[in-house]
């Protein structure tokens, strides 16, 4: 690690984009305009499942003020029979059909056409004039319905076990022999669980503003978790080469995984191309809820076998996850992460990807992992209860550590899971007294974390300050972390470092803001770029002093001779060297592009206290502590912020959030009033305990932190509810009607 | 129907604009007046990202018709700082990292300012219930509540 004096790393500095965001100046996706701009609107399917026999747009096109109409004919078709065309984890065969239905509409809200007109009102009016001839088909929303032998099949080409099926794929992680493992067990517990789809819930709806010049040069202004993803997907779906598309990352008003794919950009691009006018599109909240990705609902069965002393000898998990209209549910996260915190000799973890007539799922914070952890961590709680072992002690006894081979493949290097368990055990929260109808639960969680491609430029300005350009949209404060690291490396005040997010044509390729990778990867490239800049600065000083560059050191923002033997010279500051740059070899700066490696997985352990209002069935979280191995907290406030935000989302998932479908197969609660995310008065303060076991493969010891904190939450809440009531819930959300029903059924051992 | 002519005051400045009868105050602010600091998260009064004050009263500008501004005083996030000098709430939000993506921040600040104008010494519970109409999906509210309470304490100290 090349941290020198640690002046800025670990400091709670003011974020570079902060003033813009507290004064309303920051420009998000819907906040810009262009001269001559017109408005785009999407016509969406009212049916959950329907064959599109024909679309007639003539009347819409004839409406005064309408400038362009597009349908699936205008979008590049990636034919299913030609095989997968992958962009990251997305198959463009599904992506082209998700942005615009082709032969079939597969969920209510599925786009079937788009219009651009001089006003929003005219565009909306024109949508109503488009005549779509639908053949309405039987539909299936829930997993059970999609798996019935006579279920309507969404994708007729697909076969599972030789038969047409909505199961689009199966994966497994395997270690040892579970049959043998369960024979060795003295106690086996097997339980089944369900979770509901929940939306990422970003407050900023999807929006974009796009212009296409006569020569095809395209400018995209939109908010996403990756401007390069926007460029690539738009290019593939419109046929415009990537070199002609400048995708500018607006400030992004929350993503949580949900903005890792495109919805509007290809449509607005085609409308702009056809009309010759810049086109702005902004989704309504209802469109966001109906047509953009929630995460999967699920059905899981987990079986764990142990010795009487608490040693876990075998584990089997099977996880069925809803993909929505197109294949691609996050089964990898459920399968790979669920058992990863434990050293278990015999493991089989299986995942099934199930299509049904709801919107295509999108990534949501540690995709799949919270679903798997919910099931596994609840079974562990029952195991601890049956064996009369403290739940943290049971986890400590079986904890993965350096050298443990995880079922999903890797052998863990130095990891901090045990440290999180020990910190939880010794935390005052763990021993605090509880009152009537109050209960405490614990749970752990794991997320893979990711590295991957990142680019950065570090440029010294003519007045001796620093501009860092990276390629990752900053959602949670990553610019502040990068400023801290760059200031540290260059030995200057962090206020002299300006960090910006470049557009696709001004900074090198950088993969998505996702997988908890941004600070890990971008600080790696920024560190290498800063090292190159420092090497240049030392060379320049050496040249001026006429000594060897090896005899120059960089310290506290200035070049110094390494020792009096090297010569007696006044230090040359960054400003001095910037001023002399033109005569000493030119501008000072460096860019680095890497496919970063060494992002090690992250672990967390949570303690949750709840109080149940037994009259109303309301579960309230009254105290919460999230413990996590964060590697190195470069900016502790934003690390805590990640933990607190993840916990709040998990509490919503556990207690309230769900889509309610009506008898017509449509979402009945597509707004924030009825889709009930946690509000300020629902939550207590959310305490964080940061354990820092530095990542040995990263220059500052950074590990991803953003996704782990959602993984343990639902199990921690469920285990706390059990502790409070003596009843276990096997389905989410533990909403007031469900809790009331369970409380009113005293003879029932377990609710649902 | 012709457009309506509205004469009002926004952040202390006299303003005139034309609007459709059905247009919301949020549309007028973000459109005709170019004040995009107020955000649209839901258009149904559930998220609070569009919070403004009307004659000192906290309202969701998405639930107010633009024409209703006639003769009243509107304040938005853009009027909160005095030139380069941030309002103590803005400063404290920065120091406490009480924002992540920032989309809810304008509304949170406007709502918090309205709270402190009514109640200079709110309890944690009062802050939480006052801000219950302002959704934040990033922070879990912890740092926001702390920032508001600490600002209130400092403003009381200053006022002494």
Image: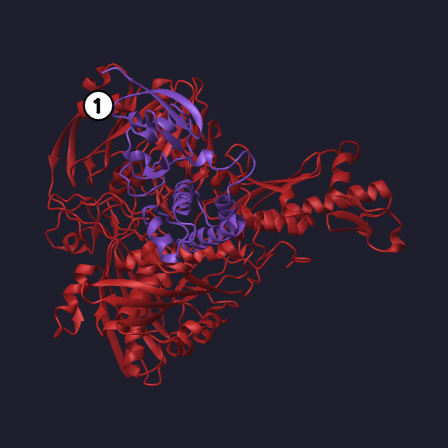
Chain colours: A red, B purple
Residue A677: x %, y % from top left: 30, 51
Within 10 Å of disc 1 (Cα), the crowding (few <14, some 14-19, many 20+) is some
Q: Residue at x 46, y 34 (%)?
A: B79
Given residues A91 and A44, the one toward you in this image is A44
Q: Residue at x 35, y 85 (%)?
A: A309
For the residue pair A597 and B14, the one nearer the viewer reads as B14
Could you tell me which quadrant the N terminus of chain B lies in?
A: top left
Which chain is home to disc 1?
A
Q: Quarter of the image holding residue A730? A: bottom left
- Any part of residue A237 in sight: no
Return the x and y of residue A52 as percentages of the image width and height. Answer: 17, 32
Local SS, label 1: helix
Left or right: A541, with A155 as reference point: right
- In the depicted view, which residue is nearer to us: A241 or A695? A695
The number of numbered discs placed on residues in the rendered structure image is 1
Q: In which quarter of the image is residue A289?
A: top left
The answer to whether residue A451 shows anywhere in this view is yes
Percent coordinates x, y for residue B120 in the rendering? 43, 50
Circle 1 residue: A125
Q: Position of residue A76 (x, y in %)?
A: 32, 30
User: Relative to A196, does residue A223 appear above or below in the rendering?
Assistant: above
Is residue A534 depicted above or below A77 in this figure?
A: below
């Amino acid at each position: 690690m090349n941290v020198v004096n640690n002046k800025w790393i670990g400091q709670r500095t003011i974020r570079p984009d902060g003033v813009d965001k507290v004064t309303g100046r920051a420009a998000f996706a819907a906040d810009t305009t262009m001269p001559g701009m017109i408005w785009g609107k999407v016509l969406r399917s009212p049916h959950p499942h329907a064959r599109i026999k024909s679309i007639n747009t003539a009347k819409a096109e004839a409406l005064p003020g309408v400038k362009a109409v597009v349908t699936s004919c205008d979008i590049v078709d990636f034919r299913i029979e030609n095989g997968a065309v992958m962009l990251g984890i997305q198959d463009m065969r599904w992506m082209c059909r998700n942005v615009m239905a082709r032969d079939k509409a597969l969920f209510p809200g599925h786009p079937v056409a788009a219009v651009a007109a001089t006003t929003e009102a005219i565009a909306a009016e024109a949508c109503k004039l488009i005549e779509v001839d639908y053949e309405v088909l039987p539909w299936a929303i829930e997993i059970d319905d999609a798996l019935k032998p006579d279920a309507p099949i969404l994708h007729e080409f697909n076969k599972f076990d030789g038969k047409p099926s909505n199961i689009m794929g199966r994966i497994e992680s395997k270690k040892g022999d579970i049959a043998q493992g369960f024979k060795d067990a003295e106690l086996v517990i097997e339980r089944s669980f369900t979770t509901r789809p929940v939306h990422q819930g970003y407050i900023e709806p999807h929006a974009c503003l796009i212009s296409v010049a006569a020569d095809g040069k395209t400018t995209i202004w939109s908010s996403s978790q990756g401007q390069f993803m926007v460029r690539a997907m738009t290019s593939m779906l419109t046929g415009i080469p990537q070199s002609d598309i400048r995708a500018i990352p607006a400030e992004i008003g929350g993503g949580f995984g949900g903005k890792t794919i495109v919805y509007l950009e290809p449509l607005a691009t085609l409308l702009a191309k056809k009309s010759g006018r810049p086109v702005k599109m902004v989704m309504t909240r209802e469109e966001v809820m109906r047509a953009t990705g929630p995460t999967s609902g699920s059905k899981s069965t987990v079986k764990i076998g142990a010795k009487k002393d608490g040693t876990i000898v075998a584990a089997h998990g099977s996880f069925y996850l809803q993909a929505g209209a197109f294949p691609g549910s996050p089964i990898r996260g459920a399968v790979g992460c669920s058992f990863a915190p434990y050293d278990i000799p015999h493991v089989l973890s299986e995942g099934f990807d199930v299509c049904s007539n709801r919107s295509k799922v999108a990534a949501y914070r540690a995709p799949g992992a919270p679903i798997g952890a919910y099931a596994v961590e609840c079974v562990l709680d029952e195991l601890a209860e049956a064996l009369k072992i403290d739940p943290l002690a049971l986890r400590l006894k079986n904890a993965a550590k350096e050298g443990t081979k995880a079922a999903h493949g890797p052998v863990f290097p130095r990891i901090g899971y045990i440290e999180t368990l020990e910190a939880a055990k010794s935390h005052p929260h763990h021993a605090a007294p509880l009152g009537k109808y109050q209960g405490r639960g614990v749970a752990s969680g794991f997320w893979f974390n990711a590295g991957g491609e990142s680019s950065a430029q570090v440029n010294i300005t003519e007045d001796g300050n620093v501009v860092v350009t990276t390629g990752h949209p900053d959602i949670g404060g990553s610019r502040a972390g990068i400023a801290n690291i760059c200031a540290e490396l260059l030995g200057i005040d962090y206020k002299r470092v300006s960090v910006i997010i470049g557009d696709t044509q001004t900074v090198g390729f950088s993969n998505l803001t996702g997988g908890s990778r941004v600070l890990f990867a971008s600080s790696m490239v920024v560190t290498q770029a800063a090292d190159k800049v420092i090497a240049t600065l030392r060379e320049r000083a050496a040249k001026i002093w006429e000594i060897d560059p090896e005899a120059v050191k960089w310290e506290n923002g200035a070049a110094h001779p390494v020792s009096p033997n090297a010569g007696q010279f006044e230090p040359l500051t960054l400003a001095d060297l910037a001023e002399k740059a033109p005569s000493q070899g030119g501008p000072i700066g460096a860019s680095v592009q890497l496919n970063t490696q060494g992002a090690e997985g992250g672990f967390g352990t949570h303690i949750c206290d709840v109080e149940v209002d037994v009259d109303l069935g309301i579960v309230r979280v009254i105290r919460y502590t999230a413990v996590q191995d964060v590697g190195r907290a470069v900016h502790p406030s934003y690390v805590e912020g990640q933990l607190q935000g993840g916990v709040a989302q998990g509490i919503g998932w556990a207690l309230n959030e769900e889509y309610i479908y009506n008898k017509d197969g449509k979402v009945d609660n597509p707004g924030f009033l009825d889709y009930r995310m946690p509000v300020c008065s629902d939550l207590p303060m959310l305490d964080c305990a940061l354990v820092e076991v530095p990542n040995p493969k990263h220059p500052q010891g950074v590990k991803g932190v953003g996704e782990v904190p959602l993984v343990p939450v639902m199990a921690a809440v469920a285990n706390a509810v059990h502790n409070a009531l003596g009843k276990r819930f096997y389905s989410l959300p533990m909403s007031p009607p469900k809790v009331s029903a369970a409380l009113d059924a005293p003879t029932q051992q377990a609710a649902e | 129907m012709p457009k309506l002519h509205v004469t009002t005051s926004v952040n202390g400045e006299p303003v005139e604009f034309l609007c459709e009868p059905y247009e919301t105050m949020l549309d007028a602010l973000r459109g005709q007046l170019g004040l995009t600091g107020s955000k649209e998260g839901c258009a149904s009064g559930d998220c609070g990202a569009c919070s403004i004050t009307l004659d000192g009263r906290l309202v969701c500008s998405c639930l107010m018709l633009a024409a209703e501004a006639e003769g009243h005083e509107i304040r938005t996030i853009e009027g909160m700082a005095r030139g380069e000098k941030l309002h103590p709430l803005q400063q404290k939000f920065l120091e406490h990292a009480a924002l992540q993506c920032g989309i809810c921040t304008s509304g949170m600040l406007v709502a918090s300012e309205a709270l402190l104008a009514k109640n200079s010494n709110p309890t944690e519970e009062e802050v939480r219930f006052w801000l219950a109409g302002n959704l934040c999906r990033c922070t879990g509210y912890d740092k926001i509540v702390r920032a508001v309470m600490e600002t209130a304490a400092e403003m009381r100290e200053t006022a002494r």
